[in-house]
Image (cartoon, grey):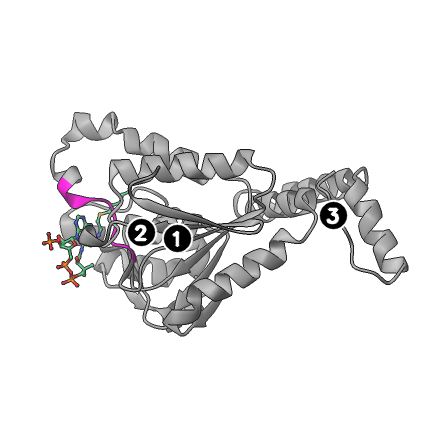
Amino acid sequence: MPQTLAVQSHQAVCLITLQRPQALNALSTELLAELATELERCTHDDTIRAVVLTGSRKAFAAGADLNEMAERDLVGMLNDPRQAYWQRITGFAKPMIAAVNGYALGGGCELAMHADILIAGEEAQFGQPEINLGIMPGAGGTQRLLRAVGKSLAMQMVLSGEPISARRALEAGLVSEITPPELTVERALQIATTIASKAPLAVRLAKEALLKAQDLDLASGLRFERHAFTLLAGTADRNEGIRAFQEKRPARFNGQ
Ligand code: HXC
């Protein structure tokens, strides 16, 4: 039983709620380990097709646990087990939606950016305040943030440490929708449920292709897309999808 997470199944969607209210969901070693383990469980469970990750109304996550960080010197940081947990979280291949309310700061903002889709409550705040502590982001806050919001805003956020509002995050493309806070999780679950109803292999390859767009040059990305598209022609779900269209009925995908 995880101590720092609550896990609930909503049919094919797993809802994971960060639960360290005493520290605004600061990302302790224990929390990162439990999250990595839970996501791996979702990977191996064929009945789970998508994940929604959320926190509380006050905080999605207020960053790395600063009390733990205070105890680590340079050698401690180089041997930091949390880096391995971050790697395992990043490698999650099923669709993940972050439902963000309250503070998403530092590692919390970086964790939200690991998600494929971000939905935010109107009062959410996104920030990379590491500079205030004499450090800098270390889990994607320079790389993913710049790709998400562009150079100027990423520089402003990382170098000044000042957070942005949910509305600003929407305008900048960091989040795709904002909702009243009490509806954020519900909206994320709705989107996840829609995605969970699609052919899993197509979803998986489409996610992979979209992520490649951030890493590859256009020609290589288009080559990857064409290969993935062609590969799906060999799946039963592709035949079912087209047959269902012709027969004017909903498709029944089985992941084959
Ligand atoms: C440990 C934290 C914490 C954190 C909050 N708390 N953030 N504990 N690590 N990151 C604890 C507080 O100590 C306090 O505990 C309780 O949560 C409530 O927080 P308050 O500060 O009293 O709440 P509030 O006044 O509402 O202010 C909220 C806040 C502030 C603005 C979010 O807590 C804050 O600035 N937190 C730090 C945010 C931050 O700098 N994050 C970046 C960390 S570096 P007590 O016991 O006093 O009640 C990072 C690097 C990632 O993330 C690298 C990844 C590889």
Q: How far apart are marks 1 and 3 (CA)?
A: 29 Å
97 vs 41, nearest the viewer: 41
* Res. 73 in view: yes
Mark 1 element type: helix
- Disc 3 residue crowd, few under 14, some 14–19, many 20+, Cα 10 Å: some
Residue numbers of the magenta segment = 60-67
- Is the residue 216 above or below the residue 97 in the image? above
Q: In the image, ligand 1 is in what quadrant? A: bottom left
Q: In the drawing, does residue 224 fall left or right of residue 250?
A: left
Q: Residue at label 3?
A: 253
The disc placed on residue 66 is: none
- Is residue 63 found inside the magenta-colored segment of the image? yes
Amino acid of disc 3: Phe
Q: Residue 106 location, x and y as percent?
A: 27, 51
- Is the residue 120 above or below the residue 53 in the image? below
Q: Are the residues flagged by discs 3 and 2 in contact, CB closer than 8 Å? A: no
Q: Nearer the viewer, mark 1 or mark 3?
A: 3
Mark 2 element type: helix
41 vs 161, nearest the viewer: 41
Amino acid of disc 2: Gly
- Is residue 215 found inside the magenta-colored segment of the image? no
Q: Residue 20 location, x and y as percent?
A: 25, 49
Q: Can you say which quadrant of the picture contains the C terminus?
A: top right
Q: Are the residues flagged by discs 2 and 1 in contact, CB closer than 8 Å? A: yes
Which of the 4 image quarters holds residue 74? top left
Q: Residue at label 1?
A: 112
The disc placed on residue 108 is: 2
Q: Residue 171 location, x and y as percent?
A: 44, 71
Q: Distance between the residues labelled 3 and 2?
A: 35 Å
Q: Nearer the viewer, mark 3 or mark 2?
A: 3
